[in-house]
């Protein structure tokens, strides 16, 4: 239990994830007496899941303007946080604390060890080195505010009866994704009571459930260099090029995760169709010529045995069935009309979205505190005098591949720094 003398702090950080740990580290580096509150029994549970357990720390994009573009329409909000603590500063922080890093394909940056726990160790060691008071199993029950004209947080009541008082507070409780790690959206409730606008939280960077049954037949198959298109009302909305994975429920993989946020948004308006181009490097005409060449070489083979040079073996039975061409038919008997139908199928393999898989499998949460109510140069609330915000709790997100951890490092660092600067 906290001793009475330890109940009062300069800065109280709620949430022991990436942004919360970084905020606490920075505030303590500047000499503040800091407490970090985490409702789990350990810090960084969600961090350990990032990058499939390898922790994709950030992206090797050192131009803040180019990096900010990847966060969509709201990306400009990040320009200042990135200028204070961007990719370069993030790498320097981890390397100075002994973490060896590597840059992989697609500019993704990982620890050389491929172990997320090594990233977490750097953060926890830095917290201890800077004498941050770490309280685990410390679930906040209520945020008590003053009745002054300008709102101000007076103290925190923990569910176990303890009270925490600080001059400034930083909320870094994340969103609602991976609720098993403790991300259950608690922060949204407190912030709404404080007067903040919460943009409706939705799951993002999550797999997509498909209505058709055939993806299950190809489950486990990963396709590289394919292109996926999102359509609504017969209009193309967005697309991604890269890697896709078939699953028992539908599809996953980097391009699916990146498109899931937009798909979720569109589903609220109506039905959504996806079209997969299995051969984006070939035009319709070139793919048709390729098929003609393949069929010529294998003229006496049955159709079901003629696509091995063009498609992965697991996908062939699916395509054969969907094409409507008799699988026993010899390829020299396939008509031009049937061949055209096959080309269209390979270039526009249609899927109907059933739903997103939800917060249980989502990597991040879309939505959160409106950016209009946060000062981008300090991460300070415009509504509450002594409140700062960082990480996934705010209405900002990036695609998969290190962008969302960088968002946490940058906003957490700036919030920690600003919370101390405002004390003077």
Image: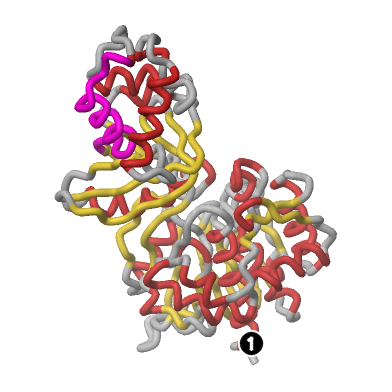
Q: Looking at the image, which residue is at 38% across and 14% down?
A: 299
The residue closer to the viewer here, 354 or 235, is 235
Residue 85 lies within the magenta run: no
Q: Residues within 10 Å of mark 1 (few under 14, many from 20)?
A: few
Q: Is residue 323 above or below residue 130?
A: above
Q: Quadrant of residue 147?
A: bottom left
Q: Is residue 121 above or below residue 381?
A: above
Q: Quadrant of the N terminus?
A: bottom right
Question: Visible in this render: residue 356?
Answer: no
Task: Give the structural element (helix, strand or loop) at label 1.
Answer: helix
Question: Is 316 placed left or right of 180 in the picture?
Answer: left
Q: Quadrant of the C terminus?
A: bottom right
Residues rendered magenta in the picture: 332-352
Q: Looking at the image, which residue is at 51% across and 53% down?
A: 400
- Residue pushed farthest bottom? 424
Q: Looking at the image, which residue is at 37% across and 71% down?
A: 73
Colouring of the image: secondary structure
Residue 346 lies within the magenta run: yes
Residue 256 lies, in percent from the top left, at 41, 44
Q: Looking at the image, which residue is at 73% across and 66% down?
A: 91
Q: Which residue has dot 1 on it?
A: 421
Q: Is residue 272 above or below residue 138?
A: above
The residue closer to the viewer here, 416 or 119, is 119
SS majority, magenta: helix
Residue 202 lies, in percent from the top left, at 34, 53
Question: Visible in this render: residue 78?
Answer: yes
The residue closer to the viewer here, 309 or 68, is 309
């Amino acid at each position: 239990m906290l001793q009475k003398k330890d109940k009062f702090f300069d800065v109280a950080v709620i949430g022991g994830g990436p942004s919360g740990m970084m905020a606490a580290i920075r505030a303590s580096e500047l000499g503040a007496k800091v407490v970090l509150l985490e409702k789990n029994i350990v810090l960084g549970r969600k961090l350990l899941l990032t990058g499939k357990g390898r922790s994709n720390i950030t992206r090797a994009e050192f131009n803040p303007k180019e990096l900010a573009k990847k966060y969509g329409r709201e990306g400009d909000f990040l320009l200042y946080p990135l200028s204070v603590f961007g990719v370069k500063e993030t790498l320097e922080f981890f390397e100075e604390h002994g973490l060896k890093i590597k840059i992989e394909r697609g500019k993704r940056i990982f620890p050389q060890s491929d172990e997320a726990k090594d990233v977490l160790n750097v953060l926890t060691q830095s917290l201890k080195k800077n004498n941050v008071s770490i309280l685990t199993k410390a679930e906040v029950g209520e945020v008590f505010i003053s009745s002054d004209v300008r709102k101000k947080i007076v103290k925190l009541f923990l569910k176990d009866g303890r009270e925490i008082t600080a001059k400034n507070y930083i909320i870094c409780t994340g969103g609602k994704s991976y609720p098993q790690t403790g991300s259950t959206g608690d922060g949204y409730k407190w912030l709404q009571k404080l007067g903040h606008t919460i943009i409706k939280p939705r799951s993002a960077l999550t797999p997509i459930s498909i209505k058709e049954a055939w993806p299950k037949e190809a489950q486990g198959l990963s396709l590289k260099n394919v292109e996926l298109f999102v359509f609504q009302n017969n209009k193309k909305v967005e697309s991604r090029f890269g890697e896709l994975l078939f699953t028992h429920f539908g599809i996953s993989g980097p391009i699916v995760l990146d498109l899931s946020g937009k798909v979720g948004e569109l589903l609220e308006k109506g039905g959504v169709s996806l079209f997969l181009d299995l051969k984006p490097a070939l035009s319709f005409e070139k793919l048709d010529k390729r098929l003609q060449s393949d069929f010529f070489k294998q003229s006496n083979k049955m159709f079901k045995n003629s696509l091995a040079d063009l498609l992965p073996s697991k996908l062939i039975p699916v395509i054969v069935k969907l094409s409507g061409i008799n699988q026993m038919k010899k390829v020299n008997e396939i008509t031009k009309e049937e061949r055209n139908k096959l080309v269209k199928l390979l270039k526009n393999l249609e899927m109907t979205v059933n739903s997103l898989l939800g917060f249980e499998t989502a990597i991040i949460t879309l939505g959160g505190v409106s950016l209009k109510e946060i000062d981008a140069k300090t991460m300070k609330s415009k509504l509450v005098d002594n409140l700062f915000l960082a990480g996934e709790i705010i209405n900002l997100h990036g695609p998969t591949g290190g962008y969302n951890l960088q968002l946490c490092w940058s906003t957490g660092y700036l919030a920690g720094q600003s919370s101390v600067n405002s004390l003077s």
